[in-house]
Amino acid sequence: MAAFSTGTALTHVSAMAELEAGLAYITTNSAEAMRIDCTSVARFDSSALAVLLAWFRAAQAGGKTLEVLNLPAKLKSLARAYGVDELLKL
């Protein structure tokens, strides 16, 4: 299983760079199961959910599974509020 760690922020300012880095990881990695580690994420906004959803779609399109680890509790709560927690398998 391969693992990718996000940066410290998943906000509208950093979303595009994080999106691209995660997509590159997902599409170039030969592992069928991958993990995204969000331990270092200290700042986020709703852009984080868009990035996570895009990563899940990319993994699914490539026939891979993706697990998000150590998502901050407040980001999980935001996902529930937007109704995407089940899509993100949280």
Image (cartoon, rainbow, N blue to C red):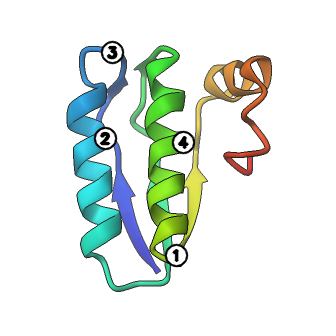
Q: Position of residue 24 (x, y in %)?
A: 23, 60
Contact, mark 1 vs mark 4 (Cβ under 8 Å): no
Q: Residue at x 59, y 38 (%)?
A: 71
Which residue position is annotated with label 1? 64
Give the spatial CA distance, label 4 vs label 2. 10 Å
Which residue position is annotated with label 3? 12
Q: Quadrant of the C terminus?
A: top right
Q: Position of residue 53 (x, y in %)?
A: 54, 42
**Which label number is shown at residue 19?**
2
Q: Residue at x 31, y 27 (%)?
A: 15
N-term-proximal mark, 1 vs 4: 4
**Which label number is shown at residue 33?**
none
Give the spatial CA distance, label 4 vs label 3. 15 Å
The residue carrying pointer 1 sits among few (fewer than 14), some (14 to 19) or many (20 or more) residues within 10 Å by Cα, namely some
**Please, is residue 34 above or below residue 36 in the view?**
below
Q: State the SS at label 3.
A: loop
N-term-proximal mark, 2 vs 1: 2
Contact, mark 4 vs mark 3 (Cβ under 8 Å): no
Q: Position of residue 58 (x, y in %)?
A: 44, 59
Give the spatial CA distance, label 2 vs label 3. 11 Å
Which residue position is annotated with label 4? 53
The amino acid type found where label 4 is placed reads: Leu
Closer to the camera in the image, 47 or 74: 47
N-term-proximal mark, 4 vs 2: 2
The amino acid type found where label 2 is placed reads: Leu
The amino acid type found where label 3 is placed reads: His
